[in-house]
Structure formats: C-alpha cells, structure tokens
Image (cartoon, rainbow, N blue to C red):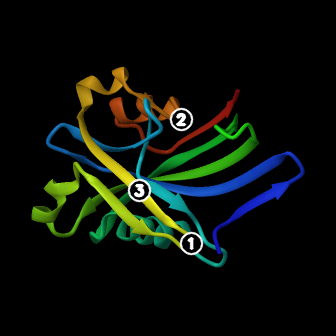
Amino acid sequence: MDIKICNGDLKFKYRVSGIIIDNGKVLIEQYGKTTYCLPGGYVQIGENSNDAIVRELKEETNLDFEIVNFRGIIENFFTNKKGQKTHEIDFYYYLKVKNYESYKKLDMCIIEKGEYSDIKHHFKWINLKDLEQYNLLPTAIKYVIINDKSNFHFIIKE
C-alpha cells in the first residue's frame, strides 16, 4: 500500500524520484500539457526509499536501475491539480540503468499496469542546457540538476 494519507482537506505523500542523466540529457516525465517531473512514485508501507525508487522505475519503464547515490530531500507544500492542499516529502536518488541499450529507448510513452487502473507515462530526454525552459516541478529540482548538487534539503511553501 502506497503511503498517501488524507486528513480532512490535507493530503500527505511520501515519494521517491530518480535523477537519470546520460550524454548531457536528463530523463523527465510529462504530466498535463506543460508540466514535468522526474520519474518516480510512492513509497509503500514497510518499504525503504532505496527499494522504492528501484521498484517504481522498474514498474514504470520495465528496466532495471541501480542507485549511484542519494542526493537529497525536498519537502513541498502545495495545492495539487485537483485543488487539494498537499504535503509531500520526496527523496531524490541519482541512478543508472543496468542494460544500457534498452535505456536509449525511454523517449516514449509506456503503459504501466496500476493496482486500480492503467497509468500512461510519457518519458522524454531533454538537454541539460534546455532545462530552464521546462516547467519541471518542484522548481527547486532544476537548480539541483543544473548545479549537480547533493546533500540538499529544501522546504518549499506555496
């Protein structure tokens, strides 16, 4: 069971996200028409964040990844697209794929079989030099990627 808690009008989420960089490009996922995030998902009850990021990326891409290192945490308070106030804690990991040839094929749409319904993922490689042009959320992650930061902790309040 994913760690998502609703308490009245407040939603809490515990997530993991992967920073995947290759040949001057970073892998992002599109959701909505103009909004992007890093690939990842929810941590399950009883699961550690290391196992969660590897599992989530396997579910979403059908590829095996390994963790290079832990990068940091962003604690984010925002209103989601459904209008719910949300408190999200996201652990960020730098990863690499185990099978490099399959890795190159990630600029595509993938259908993940979800617990209750299928989930459509649209992954896209973008040049690091073009990252500022994208609405990548949370916005602090752009700074982290562009400046190759680690050991970061941001608290973002809308």
Give the x, y percent position of residue 99.
16, 69
Q: Judging from the image, what secondary structure is the residue with disc 2 in? A: loop
| Relative side of 81 to 18, left or right | right
* As drawn, 21 above or below 64: above
Mark 2 Cα shell of 10 Å, populated few (<14), some (14-19), many (≥20): some
Task: Name the residue: 42% across, 46% down.
Answer: 38
Residue that numbered label 3 is attached to:
120
Which badge, 2 or 3, comes first in the chain's sequence? 3
Question: Residue flagged by tag 3: what amino acid is it?
Answer: Lys
Return the x and y of residue 6 as percentages of the image width and height: 81, 56
Task: Choose between 147 and 36: the one closer to the eye.
Answer: 36
- Which image quarter holds the N terminus? bottom right
Q: Where is residue 85 in the image (x, y as percent from the top left)?
A: 77, 40
Front-most of 102 and 67?
102
| Residue 133 or residue 152, whichever sits in front | 133
107 or 33, nearer to the observer: 33
- Position of residue 21 measured from the top left corner of the image (x, y, whole percent): 25, 46
Quarter containing the C terminus: top right
Q: Tell which tag, 2 or 3, sits nearer the viewer.
A: 3
Q: Name the residue under label 1.
A: 48
Marks counted in the figure total: 3
The Cα atoms of the two marked residues, 3 and 1, are separated by: 25 Å
* Residue count near mark 1 (Cα–Cα under 10 Å), binned few <14, some 14–19, many ≥20: few
The vertical placement of 62 against 13, above or below, is: below
Binning the other alpha carbons within 10 Å of mark 3 as few (below 14), some (14 to 19) or many (20 upward) gives some
Mark linked to residue 138: 2
